Amino acid sequence: MKIKCKVITRSSRNEVVGLESLHKLGLNFKKKNGEDDLPFLKIYLTAIPVDGKANKELVKLLAKELKIGKSKVEIIKGEKKSEKIIEILF
């Protein structure tokens, strides 16, 4: 399963908040099928985006929330961006 997420780093908490629309987040992605207001999973992380720390914390948080191993969560797009596509293997 693939999910899209918007990661907010340097937060006071690690938390998966919920779905937000891209326009609400101030983003405007152009999709191939013309849909540019797709929902994103909004995630807050305490880590800073340096040396992959935020990505590691994101994987750890999602694995914990989904009760699966960290090896089952992979960032497949957007490793150096706040908008990411995550693949969850079950």
Image (cartoon, grey):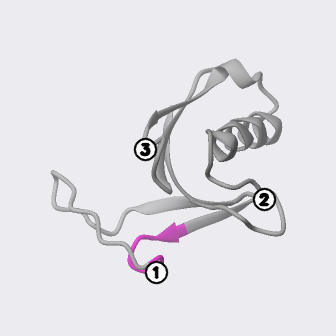
Q: Nearer the viewer, residue 33 or 30?
A: 30
Magenta span of residues: 20-25
Q: Nearer the viewer, residue 9 or 61?
A: 9
Whole-Å distance between the Cαs marked 1 and 3?
Answer: 20 Å
Lower sequence index among marks 1 and 3: 1
The x, y position of residue 48, in whole percent, is 69, 55
Q: Identify the image quadrant of residue 22.
A: bottom left
* Label disc, if present, on residue 78 of the rendered structure: 3
For the residues labelled 2 and 3, say whether their Cβ atoms are less than 8 Å apart. no
The x, y position of residue 1, in whole percent, is 51, 31
Is residue 81 found left or right of 35 in the rendered image? right
Neighbours of disc 1 within 10 Å: few (<14), some (14-19), many (20+): few
Please name the residue that numbered disc 2 is placed on.
Answer: 46
Task: Residue type at mark 2: give it.
Answer: Thr
Please name the residue that numbered disc 1 is placed on.
Answer: 24
Q: Main secondary structure of the magenta part?
A: loop
Q: Residue at x 21, y 56 (%)?
A: 31
Residue farthest toward the front in the current orientation of the protein: 51
Lower sequence index among marks 1 and 2: 1
